[in-house]
Amino acid sequence: MRLMLLVWRLLGRKAFSLLLYPVVGVYWLTAAHARNASQHWLARVRTQLTSRQRPVPSRLTSFHHFLRFGEAMLDKIASWRGELQFGRDVVFAPGAEATLNITAPTGKLLLASHLGDVEACRALAQLQGSKTINALVFSDNAQRFKQIMDEMAPQAGLNLMPVTDIGPDTAILLKEKLERGEWIAIVGDRIAVNPQRGGEWRVCWSRFMGQPAPFPQGPFILASILRCPVQLIFALRQNGKRHIHCEPFADPLLLPRAERQQTLQQAIDRYAERLEHYALQSPLDWFNFFDFWQLPDAKNKE
C-alpha cells in the first residue's frame, strides 16, 4: 500500500494506470483462491439474471472482475488524495441526495458493504454542509493502514476507527459523534476477523443469490444501540462514473428484547435482499473475493 501511494504521488494516476493491466494479470494468474471465488460469484450472477429473464452483461469474466477491483483501487487512492470531483467523477443516483439530506443536523449510521467502493463518497466532502464520516474498520491490519494513510496522504482526512470488538466504550464514543451530527459508516457484509469467545460466530444466515449466507449480527445490534437513523449506501461504477445509491433502512432500528432474534433476522434479511438487488445491477463491483456462503477463514479473505 505504501508503494502504491508513493508511485501515485511521484508519477500520477496516468502512470499508475499503465501498471494496472500487468499487475492485475499477474494477480489473476497467481491468486487461485480469489480467482475461483470470482468465477463462482459470476456463475451465481448468470444463474440469477437468467432465472429472472434479465440480460447478462458482456465482459462478465473473472479477469474483468479483477480489473474492476484494480480500477476501484485507483479510485480509492484518488479519493484519499481528494482528486475525485463530485459531479465529474461521482454523482447521486435518483433519490439518493434527498435520502442523505446532508444539511440535516442529526447524525446517522450508514450501512455499507464491499459492493463497490463506498470511499468514493468522500467526494461528498466537497458539498456544502458536508458531514464528518467515521468509518469503522474491522481488520488486523486496520491500525497499520491508518498509520500509512496519515504518513502518505494526510490530506485525505479519513476518519478510520480500527476496532476488533465493539464494547461499551466504543458505543459511547460513537454516540457522542452522532450527537455532534457526525455520520458513522460500517459494513454489514463481512464477518469479524475472529469468532467470539467460546468459538461461536455471531451471525444470522440469510438467503443471498440463491443460497443461505452468513451475515454479521454486530452492525445491526450496534445500530439498535445507537438509536439513530440507519441508511443503506452503495457506490457503484456505472457509465464511467461512481453512482451513490442511498435508501432508508430504519429510523431507528429497534430490536425488542422479547422478539430480539426474530427482528434481528428480519433486519438482516432485508439487508441481504437489497445487497442482492444492487449486486445484480453491477456484479463486477462485488469485492468479496472468498467463499461468501461459508463461515470465514481470515487467512483466505481478500
Image (cartoon, rainbow, N blue to C red):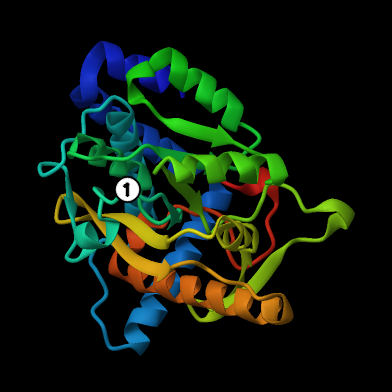
Number of labels in the image equals: 1
Q: Position of residue 139 (x, y in %)?
A: 62, 39
Q: Does dot 1 land on a helix, a strand or a loop?
A: loop
Q: Is residue 6 visible?
A: yes
Q: Position of residue 299 (x, y in %)?
A: 68, 43
Q: Position of residue 70 (x, y in %)?
A: 35, 40
The residue wearing badge 1 is 105
Which quadrant holds the C terminus? top right
Badge 1 local density, few (<14 within 10 Å), some, or many (20+)?
some
Q: Is residue 21 visible?
A: no
Q: Nearer the viewer, residue 72 or 234?
A: 234
Q: Image check: 110 left or right of 290?
A: left
Q: Is residue 34 above or below residue 255?
A: above
Residue found at x 17% / y 39%? 128
The residue under label 1 is which amino acid type? Pro
Q: Is residue 55 above or below residue 51?
A: above
Q: Nearer the viewer, residue 101 or 40?
A: 101
Q: Is residue 188 above or below residue 11?
A: below
Q: Image check: 23 left or right of 84?
A: right
Task: In the displayed orientation, state which residue is furthest to the left.
Answer: 88
Q: Is residue 269 above or below residue 36?
A: below
Using the rendered view, name the quadrant where residue 217 is placed.
Answer: bottom right
Residue found at x 63% / y 46%? 171
Q: Position of residue 65 (x, y in %)?
A: 36, 53
Q: Nearer the viewer, residue 60 or 167?
A: 167
Residue found at x 53% / y 59%? 188
Q: Image check: 55 left or right of 177?
A: left
Residue found at x 45% / y 76%? 273
Q: Nearer the viewer, residue 94 or 273?
A: 94
Using the rendered view, name the quadrant where residue 275 is placed.
Answer: bottom left
